[in-house]
């Protein structure tokens, strides 16, 4: 199993990939999906599975890997696909009865691929300002200022505060590659449940690279727990989900520092959920910048 490094720390149904590797499991970190393809080429006797996870940012590289594997006619390379789409998740959050989100900072790295025209209808329909930002402190502050100014003026526009990297239309070449390999599907989001049109799955033309189908009969050693391959909802069955308040953080109902596990049972080195895994997550950002001061209610 090959994966990006940050995924090794994410809790699984029974254990993290990092724990699996420490017990001798064959888990290898790669820096690109194409690295996994090259590993399969060099080791024709070995099945190589790439854990294809991430937002629209990483989907083009995964699509390129699939096309390369298809051109090379590889029969020992496959994907465990868990790509998700940001806009449908934003829609799901805004439709939630518990929603308290007043504005969005649209992730700049996602918008480099998708552009930001796709957010205009969302902003108009729900009356929420959206600012496209990077992840540097100055970028985040600029985005927050933009949203506050819009809220005070009663506007709900999409403003690009990250013009050095993002255009309105995004990377159309990358979009075309993703569209060739993937199709939109409903997707289980940890903490949010099933999000309509919230993910990507391989098109039927590339079904031979779907690890869920290739390893349909694989069972976990030493038990009958369902694996991620077998169950889209297996993450929700993880006991850690009871402790992880990611859904409330995403919905603006709970600040990361108000979670009982923040900085204790959940840290960047030992995260309970995705918001603490990378520096782009809300919980990890609070942890990194020490944002523990009270705010006015």
Image (cartoon, grey):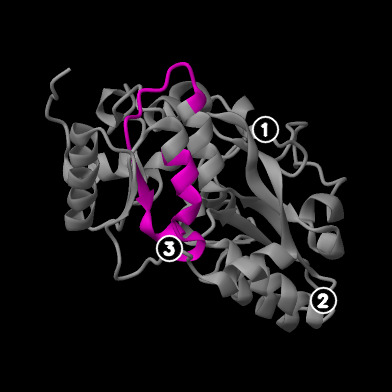
In the image, taking residue 11 as reference, residue 204 lies left or right, namely right
Q: Between disc 3 and disc 1, whose residue precedes?
A: 3
**Is disc 2 placed on a helix, strand or loop?**
loop
Mark 3 and mark 1: span between their CA atoms? Answer: 37 Å
Which residue shows up at 51% across the image and 35% down it? Answer: 91
Tell me if residue 12 can be seen. Answer: yes
Residue count near mark 2 (Cα–Cα under 10 Å), binned few <14, some 14–19, many ≥20: some
How many residues crowd around disc 1 within 10 Å: few (fewer than 14), some, or many (20 or more)?
Answer: some
Element on which disc 3 rests: loop
Name the residue at 63% across, 57% down.
Answer: 51
Q: Which mark is residue 168?
A: 3
- Find residue 204 and report its image quarter: bottom right
Residue tagged by mark 1? 234
Q: Position of residue 291 (x, y in %)?
A: 17, 37
Q: Which residue is mark 2?
A: 74
Q: In the image, is residue 285 above or below residue 39?
A: above
Residue 49 location, x and y as percent? Answer: 71, 62
The x and y percentages for residue 86 are: 51, 46
Looking at marks 3 and 2 on the same chain, the residue that comes earlier in the sequence is marked by 2
- State which quarter of the image contains the N terminus: bottom right
Q: CA distance from mark 2 to mark 1?
A: 29 Å
């Amino acid at each position: 199993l090959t994966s990006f490094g940050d995924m090794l720390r994410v809790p699984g149904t029974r254990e993290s990939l990092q724990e699996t590797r420490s017990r001798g499991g064959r888990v290898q970190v790669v820096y690109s999906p194409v690295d996994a393809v090259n590993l399969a080429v060099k080791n024709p006797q070995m099945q190589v599975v790439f854990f294809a996870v991430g937002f629209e940012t990483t989907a083009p590289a995964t699509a390129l890997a699939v096309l390369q594997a298809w051109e090379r006619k590889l029969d020992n390379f496959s994907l465990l696909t868990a790509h998700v789409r940001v806009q449908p998740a934003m829609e799901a959050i805004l439709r939630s009865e518990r929603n308290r989100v007043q504005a969005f900072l649209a992730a700049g790295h996602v918008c480099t691929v998708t552009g930001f025209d796709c957010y205009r209808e969302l902003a108009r329909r729900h009356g929420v300002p959206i600012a496209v930002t990077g992840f540097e402190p100055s970028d985040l502050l600029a985005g927050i200022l933009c949203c506050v100014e819009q809220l005070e003026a009663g506007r709900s526009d999409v403003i690009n505060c990250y013009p050095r990297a993002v255009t309105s239309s995004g990377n159309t070449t990358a979009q075309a590659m993703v569209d060739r390999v993937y199709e939109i599907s409903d997707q289980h989001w940890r903490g949010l449940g099933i999000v309509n049109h919230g993910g990507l799955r391989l098109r039927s033309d590339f079904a031979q690279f779907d690890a869920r189908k290739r390893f349909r009969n694989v069972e976990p050693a030493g038990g009958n727990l369902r694996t991620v391959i077998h169950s889209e909802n297996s993450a929700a069955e993880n006991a850690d989900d009871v402790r992880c308040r990611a859904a409330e953080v995403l919905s603006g109902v709970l600040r990361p520092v108000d979670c009982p596990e923040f900085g204790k049972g959940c840290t960047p080195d030992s995260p309970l959920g995705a918001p603490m895994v990378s520096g782009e997550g809300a919980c990890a950002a609070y942890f990194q910048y020490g944002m523990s001061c009270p705010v006015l209610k």
